[in-house]
Image (cartoon, rainbow, N blue to C red):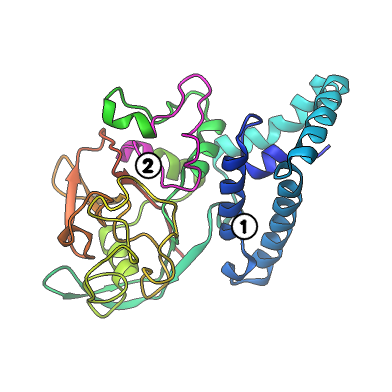
Amino acid sequence: MKDYYEILEVPVDATAEAIKEQYRFLAHAWHPDKFPSPSHKAKAEERIKEINEAYAILGDVTERALYDMERRGARTQADRGTRSAERAEPQREARSGRWTEEERIVRLGPWVTIPAGEFLYGDEKEKRILPAFQIMRYPVTQAQYQVFIDANPEYAAPFDDADWAKPYNWDRKTRRHPAGKSNHPVVLVSWNDAQAYCQWAGLRLPAEEEWEKAARGTDGRLYPWGNQSPDKTLCNFNQNERGTTPVGKYSPKGDSPNGCADMAGNVWEWTMSKYDASTYALRGGSWSSSVNLVRTAPRYWVVPSDGDYIIGFRCSLSP
């Protein structure tokens, strides 16, 4: 019996609203047009078919109730030893992080390829040259980070005792991400957390230069979309939304020349580059940042052990 909750990556007690939001996110993230190669496109088409099938059941009150009854009956009759054996190998594979390139692209995509060549870097617009690389179109979401937490039961889920962190804290008992934020960027993650996720997935954080080229292209523009000052239709900044927003909300209008989304505002993003001897560089500004800080050039710093509700990350891949 298919586990539609697992296919949609939602808990069995998820609300109808949460299921609908997660369906919209997955349908957007796995749209076949986002995958360039035929093999990746075919995998995406298979995934979309599963997602649509799952939502047809879980998105309908009556169908979901019938499915839950059948699911409980099937679980009662199933041999638990057999079920554990079937799931053990996928869990070992997830913990090892030994994913093939195709698996990484499909599971953590969509990806954007940034061509090799020159670009203008920083406020001084210095000419720099980078080899080609790939970067995630969106920041890592709460749902994507959930897969990492599920695969690594010894790793602490994002949590902070401060009052300001309450809307973004994960449930310490169930180790689930905040309800209704599946496709928001994961926050309360330190540089160390971001590194652990990347190592598990066989990926890496982008260097500052890579992040900036992905954000501004080659022409030295002030913002990902050009030189026009930001407004509520282009990015999440200046506390306009009073918190994080779903990734891709401002696409395509607010995207970079190469099609990267959320590179201005929403969350500051960790990079692999040192800011100084004891801190790492953050780029992009956040939902609380001013107009000046959501430009493509500003830098910020934080010690690697600290997280915040305005900090997230995205991953990169070398050719």
Give the mark toward the camera: 2 or 1.
1
Q: Position of residue 65 (x, y in %)?
A: 78, 33
Question: In the rendered view, would you say 174 is above or below 272?
Answer: above
**Are the residues flagged by discs 2 and 1 in contact, CB closer than 8 Å?**
no
Q: Which stretch appears magenta?
A: 168-193
Q: Residue at x 50, y 32 (%)?
A: 149
Q: Position of residue 317 (x, y in %)?
A: 45, 59
SS at badge 1: helix
**Distance from label 2 to label 1 (Cα)?**
25 Å
SS at badge 2: helix
Instruction: Say whether residue 116 is left or right of residue 277.
Output: right
Q: Position of residue 244 (x, y in %)?
A: 36, 47
**Which residue, given by chain and number where applicable, does mark 1 sit on?**
27
Instruction: Say whether residue 23 is left or right of residue 210.
Output: right
Give the total of numbered labels: 2
Question: In the rendered view, would you say 3 is above or below 319?
Answer: above
Residue 183 belongs to magenta span:
yes
**Predominant SS along the magenta part:** loop
Q: Nearer the viewer, residue 17 or 251?
A: 17
Query: 10 Å neighbourhood of mark 1: few (<14), some, or many (≥20)?
Result: some
**Which residue, given by chain and number where applicable, does mark 2 sit on?**
194
The kind of residue tagged 2 is: Ala
Q: Residue at x 30, y 70 (%)?
A: 224
The kind of residue tagged 1 is: Ala
Farthest left residue in view: 124
Q: Residue at x 44, y 47 (%)?
A: 184
Q: Residue at x 82, y 34 (%)?
A: 66
Residue 268 belongs to magenta span:
no
